[in-house]
Image (tube, grey):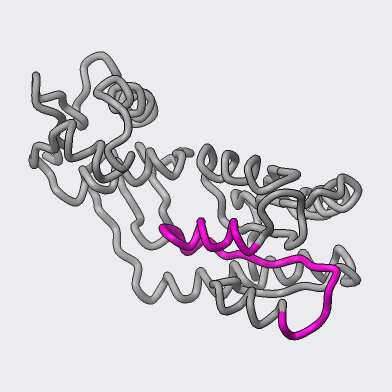
């Protein structure tokens, strides 16, 4: 049986009544729900939270759902379920071609939508189980298949950027990454050393026993950082 507890669903729609209705039904099934009314807010929520699936309206002011899907698919395979008032095949084909996992017409009942969210998550879990890869460093474990991180056996919530940073370091223990390398990889060269220090400081607070005396994410003075994997 599928267990929904612990999964976060991002609901994106410019109609507050639809958002609240879906939020109520999803929370009743023990999902954690975060919401956004447009693609700009949705991207911000996606960047700041660990999201397991997205219910995404297509037609919204400004950029539409297709635009957001394209942006997310550039670096994430999080399940996306398109929600649309239109039932024609053109939008459905476009949505699935862009990387959507399902296409739901808004005439569907909230109960059906929740069921389809569960089905997509179940399929995703099944696929990931067959190729599960875990990095184990004692106190810290990274499940690279599910993007989950555990510290002392307890799951912690990382932003997508924090997870990607930690994964890079954990996959290359004791390798020193310079500030310039990190800026180029994660910020497209835009930013400075302070940008990196802020992100790694927040990451240390989540994974270290004492963030002021880090065991894992160690500063290499004047150069950058390395991961002490033991």
Residue drawn at x 35%, y 22% is 198
Side (left or right) of 200 relative to 80: left
Q: Residue at x 60, y 73 (%)?
A: 101
Image position, residue 96 (x, y; %): 61, 77
Residue 158: percent from left, percent from top: 44, 39
Single out the residue that lies furthest toward the front.
Answer: 62
Q: Looking at the image, is 72 positioned above or below residue 87?
A: above
Foreground pick, 14 / 167: 14
Residue 87: within the magenta?
A: yes
Tell me what residue is drawn at x 54 percent, y 41 percent: 49
Q: Position of residue 50 (x, y in %)?
A: 52, 45
Q: How many marks?
A: 0
Q: Position of residue 196 (x, y in %)?
A: 29, 28
The residue nearer to you, when weighing 197 against 88, is 88
Q: Is residue 46 left or right of residue 216?
A: right
Describe residue 86's horizontal placement relative to residue 11 as left or right: right
Q: Image quadrant for the N terminus?
A: bottom right
Relative to 89, residue 33 above or below: above
Quadrant in which the C terminus is drawn: top left
- Residue at 70% x, 59% y: name it: 56
Q: Vertically, is 27 above or below 139?
A: below
Q: Is residue 180 magenta?
A: no
- 90 over 138 or under it: above or below: below
Residue 174, image quadrant: top left
**Which region of the structure is painted magenta?**
66-90
């Amino acid at each position: 049986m599928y267990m929904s507890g612990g999964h976060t669903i991002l609901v994106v729609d410019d109609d507050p009544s639809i958002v609240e209705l879906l939020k109520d039904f999803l929370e009743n099934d023990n999902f954690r729900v975060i919401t956004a009314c447009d693609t700009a807010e949705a991207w911000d929520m996606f960047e700041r939270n660990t999201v397991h699936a997205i219910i995404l309206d297509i037609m919204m002011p400004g950029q539409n759902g297709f635009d957001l899907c394209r942006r997310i698919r550039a670096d994430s395979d999080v399940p996306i379920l398109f929600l649309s008032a239109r039932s024609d095949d053109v939008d459905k084909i476009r949505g699935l071609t862009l990387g959507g996992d399902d296409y739901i017409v808004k005439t569907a009942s909230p109960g059906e939508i929740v069921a389809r969210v569960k089905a997509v998550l179940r399929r995703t879990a099944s696929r990931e189980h067959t190729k599960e890869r875990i990095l184990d460093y004692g106190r810290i474990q990274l499940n690279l298949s599910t993007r989950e991180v555990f510290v002392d056996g307890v799951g912690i919530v990382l932003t997508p950027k924090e997870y990607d940073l930690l994964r890079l370091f954990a996959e290359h223990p004791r390798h020193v990454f310079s500030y310039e390398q990190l800026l180029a990889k994660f910020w497209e060269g835009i930013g400075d050393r302070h940008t990196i220090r802020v992100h790694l400081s927040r990451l240390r607070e989540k994974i270290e026993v004492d963030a002021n005396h880090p065991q894992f994410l160690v500063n290499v003075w004047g150069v950058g950082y390395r991961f002490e994997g033991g």
